[in-house]
Image (cartoon, coloured by chain):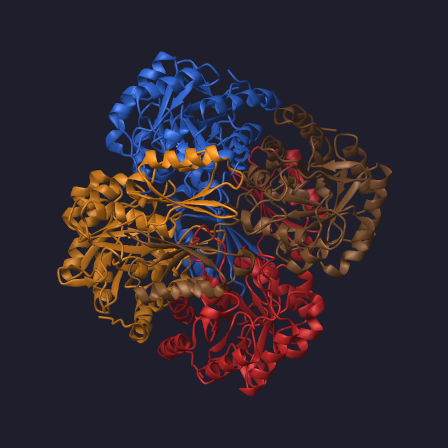
Chain colours: A blue, B orange, C brown, D red
Amino acid sequence: MIIVVKPGATAEEVDNIKSKLIDFGYTLHISEGSDRTIIGAIGDEDTLRDKPVMSIPGVESVIPILKPYKFISREFKAEDTIIEVKGVKIGGDELAIMAGPCSVESYEQMRLVAERVSSNGAKILRGGAFKPRTSPYAFSGMGEEALKYMRKAADEFNMLMVTELTDPRDLPIVSEYADILQIGARNMQNFRLLKEVGSQPKPVLLKRGMAATFNDFLLAAEHIAKEGNDNIIFCERGIKTFETTTRNTLDLSIVPLIKNASHFPIIVDPSHGTGVKECIAPMSLASVAAGADGIMIEVHPNPVEALSDGDQSLDLDQYDEVMKKLRVIAPAVGKTVA
Amino acid sequence: MIIVVKPGATAEEVDNIKSKLIDFGYTLHISEGSDRTIIGAIGDEDTLRDKPVMSIPGVESVIPILKPYKFISREFKAEDTIIEVKGVKIGGDELAIMAGPCSVESYEQMRLVAERVSSNGAKILRGGAFKPRTSPYAFSGMGEEALKYMRKAADEFNMLMVTELTDPRDLPIVSEYADILQIGARNMQNFRLLKEVGSQPKPVLLKRGMAATFNDFLLAAEHIAKEGNDNIIFCERGIKTFETTTRNTLDLSIVPLIKNASHFPIIVDPSHGTGVKECIAPMSLASVAAGADGIMIEVHPNPVEALSDGDQSLDLDQYDEVMKKLRVIAPAVGKTVA
Amino acid sequence: MIIVVKPGATAEEVDNIKSKLIDFGYTLHISEGSDRTIIGAIGDEDTLRDKPVMSIPGVESVIPILKPYKFISREFKAEDTIIEVKGVKIGGDELAIMAGPCSVESYEQMRLVAERVSSNGAKILRGGAFKPRTSPYAFSGMGEEALKYMRKAADEFNMLMVTELTDPRDLPIVSEYADILQIGARNMQNFRLLKEVGSQPKPVLLKRGMAATFNDFLLAAEHIAKEGNDNIIFCERGIKTFETTTRNTLDLSIVPLIKNASHFPIIVDPSHGTGVKECIAPMSLASVAAGADGIMIEVHPNPVEALSDGDQSLDLDQYDEVMKKLRVIAPAVGKTVA
Amino acid sequence: MIIVVKPGATAEEVDNIKSKLIDFGYTLHISEGSDRTIIGAIGDEDTLRDKPVMSIPGVESVIPILKPYKFISREFKAEDTIIEVKGVKIGGDELAIMAGPCSVESYEQMRLVAERVSSNGAKILRGGAFKPRTSPYAFSGMGEEALKYMRKAADEFNMLMVTELTDPRDLPIVSEYADILQIGARNMQNFRLLKEVGSQPKPVLLKRGMAATFNDFLLAAEHIAKEGNDNIIFCERGIKTFETTTRNTLDLSIVPLIKNASHFPIIVDPSHGTGVKECIAPMSLASVAAGADGIMIEVHPNPVEALSDGDQSLDLDQYDEVMKKLRVIAPAVGKTVA
């Protein structure tokens, strides 16, 4: 940690800063420049992070040096983590394609989607059973019934199943059906929920919060990894910005940033990340070109009848069109499509 | 709901739009202009809100007309809701001052703060027992022990006690001690938690999420009110913007917006809302001048020793200085200080 | 324009709203619903746009229906505009690759870059002569000398030359050398400058402002097109958001949005759009996959010696690597590389 | 400047970093920690700022220590700068109230406003003659005629006159009439314009750009101060955020930040800063409570007839109501109202 002392600080203030820092447990290196005194404070940043150094009179700024996360970092593990469930790999050469409707509506719907997408590159079926909705009057999912339909359709076509968990009390029931547990954007900093999924063995797909910086996102994953779960999949799904033509602003630059900083895979959700139909296919292609390990995409057999988010779902033909183009793009970035 | 038809739409497309809207349950008013056909669709927007109207071919845009919330609105209840707990009122003429440390650290600390702030305008003691922290390595609160210390100190000085609830499973224990349940910014869209606090009788202090628009904030409150709880206190605490000199950007304009749109009171938290010591006192005064019903402010007997957020806490003398100025400002906006 | 009347408005207020609207020059269609009275107001939105309709007592909201731009829209011109300068086309099947250093530093530097990039896909040389810089102490370009070096290098390799214009008083000198005039992000709403470039014949490359919404961006282009210049190239280069790991957040979703709304081409600048070296190559690929008509990319023969923005420049080998991958990706989106 | 070396950097890389830094002109202090090597680089940051240190292989991060501005800082001048024009002071104990319509429409209009506001606290008349407008079809001001009307009305009531300058070519004509030159938000980084107003003697009111950080804002002022003009007035007028209920998000926290960092006064414009009528009065009061040296407020004798921005103008009675409340609030923050 670097502490910059205010230019006008008195000798007493500087001495007090030093003694406080030593009390906090730091070892100090002092550089007295002509413009500023700068103090390098070395210590265990994990335990020292909370100390109110800025509150010591005479301190101008405090600059952390070490990264605030460990288990998720490339420094902790240099090689890519490849997550494997029932023979399906996420994070390897093959793109992980997760497709399905926003909400599970019926077994027949899930079967139709699973049949089509599994025949064209997708090995993971997505769908919502417990839906967090901004409005209390919006459709919030069919609950366990949805889990059953999705599981049945997934099994029929040898697909994995990923679905969202919104409450720690639902962990047993969701785990009974799902292969991958999704933590949604609104719960990215629900730290109690992160702790629960960190303490169980199934892989966790962690969506970026709408107000989460790169650092916040990494730290949310660290909450999970610290509990022992080392099967984490990052998922970029857009952030809140002043641009409201799209529902969110899909921040694809985070893909290379995450690949650099962490050994875990990252996928992109262009459906929620844009919320605008005309953007979904182009941004699916862009996600893979940017280096993502896969995409999560909303596909509905008949979007105009969907119970939720129909406006941002592709139909089955549009899905096929995206996959056709992805097969051209993937080799440029060292990836394959199943 | 207003549906704007694309300028080049064919007669078949327009007919299809109309019949879909009728299928969805709307009654239609058509205006054929020279530039655009505009369809006014009347129906129960609560149940119709989810319909994928944008997905119907030929639709250019869809504009909702009715407000998406009900119980929290001024239309539902014109006069201000004044919340009363053990004789303390929130939302009336008297400013609600909530003061205390970020984290409860000891009984002695709580007693020191309660003694001082209760003697100068504050009737509500705040403090964290279960702390959501961005880093998994940061101090996350003392749990039930903290609740006990806070309760004891509050009782000793006839104060109410407000503290954060982060997990539905903690509701029984937190309710046992607290008078007001706080939902933090990170949980503003934890809809399951909102439902729980909506179904119990204690007042709820709802903090604005860091990515929450005015509308998102109102809808989060509607999640609570819809369950039957009509004792809600809005709390502005800053939003995420590109300005990072302050931890968040305190959006005081939301104070008059909320007062206009809802009958529930709104307070402001300038401590988390700025995260910068030099901003806390000025923004406390500004909050009241903007029309807030109170403030929630971090006060620590010795900020430089605080276990969390010491850098954004006022000490006891600084608290008194803020209160002294508030006593001058309050009458300008029709408020009093106890 | 749709005017929604407040639910509690009196009959006098409604009558006053109507008569004001008629005074302003609108023709009215009234729908009296059970919840709201809604007034459709038809008139010339260009001249009526400024009328203070929200100020009329009893008005709840005002919703514009028509798009606020004309010449740049697909409705005005359905087919893509292909800009052609000295035989080089921008907006057609072939990707427009604009490459070169942030700042022109010497003839030799420009020659080195031009030689290499012109041999691998780039037909347009970029470089800064007049540089807007956040700090008054930063290098702000070599002025006319830079224009000469760039022109000489461009001619030697049959390249077009694009450079930024920051002041209307520089138009004569910049026009003497450049083939395409660039309006930078900081000047996107310098309307007097837009008017100047709109009134002269050279193509204009318009960069998106850091706070510009999709609509602001389109309207800035309309300022140019309205003056008669119909050779406009949009350029996405990132917006300001809370994410500060990258210098800006590159908003690739705007690519399909612009292609839908306007007939003019759009390119992307991933160098300024991210400001982070590890993101430039991936985001270049993503831009093309998203449907951009080209990219503008900073290339320096020796980034570590660059006078400005060396940290976000590719070297010549990295440039070649990007082009190699673009040759694989381009066909997926119907594009070619020269 | 602090350079943090990547943990895995080789000895050769570290040596190369050191020799590059020495080449750039820095003197070095090396700290070899167990986790990281940290290099303190001391030199003239103004000339070194542009060096591409991040591009040197093995560098993990670069942290500037010194502030990037000089003339505007409290370190350069500790005491408040009070600007005085024709006996009117800005930045002293008396609040500077700048009031008037968005656009000058007629002499009669200006006379009506000047008469009323000058009799109640305002000594500075505001009004637009050259208006930057997002739409090319919106009313953009009456030009020199407007300047004449405003000057005449200002003189009649002994007021100063402030108006916006949007183009360096207008400097002579605007200077002929105005006492204070306003640089609008859209031109805050029009560095050529800043240079022009920096080189002439009249005070400059500098509005914060919609995407300008605190640091960007200070540096824009430094562009002016560096040219020799030491009469600068900062003006907060809202930033672009995801919250679009208000036109911009008024960031009042910048008031205490600026007061701490700079000796120049800061005022607030709640009219453009919110764009919502119900917010203007509350945010005017909040601005003063936050410590602003004054406010700039849109007042129109008849907002519903205004040619621009009528929806965000107060009428004359509303203006008086704000002033009445300001007279109560001002003493709390050590200010007076004329």
| Number of numbered labels in the structure image | 0
Find residue B2 and report its horizontal and vertical position in percent.
40, 46
Residue at 39% x, 41% y: name it: B135
Find residue A126 and report its horizontal and vertical position in percent.
38, 24
Judge by depth and name the residue closer to the eye, D244 or B336: D244
Side (left or right) of C322 relative to D324: right
Q: Can you see residue B171? A: yes
Find residue A193 and report its horizontal and vertical position in percent.
30, 35
Side (left or right) of D271 relative to C173: left
Residue D253 lies in quadrant: bottom left
Residue B331 lies in quadrant: bottom left
Q: Can you see residue D252? A: no
Where the C terminus of chain C falls, by quadrant? top right
Side (left or right) of D253 relative to D230: left
Residue at 25% x, 61% y: name it: B113
In the displayed structure, would residue B327 be above or below residue B148?
A: below
Find residue B306 and report its horizontal and vertical position in percent.
33, 54
In the displayed structure, would residue A54 be above or below residue D111?
A: above
Judge by depth and name the residue closer to the eye, D260 or A58: D260
Judge by depth and name the residue closer to the eye, D271 or C260: C260
Side (left or right) of D110 relative to C323: left
Judge by depth and name the residue closer to the eye, B311 or D198: D198
Residue at the far left: name it: B86
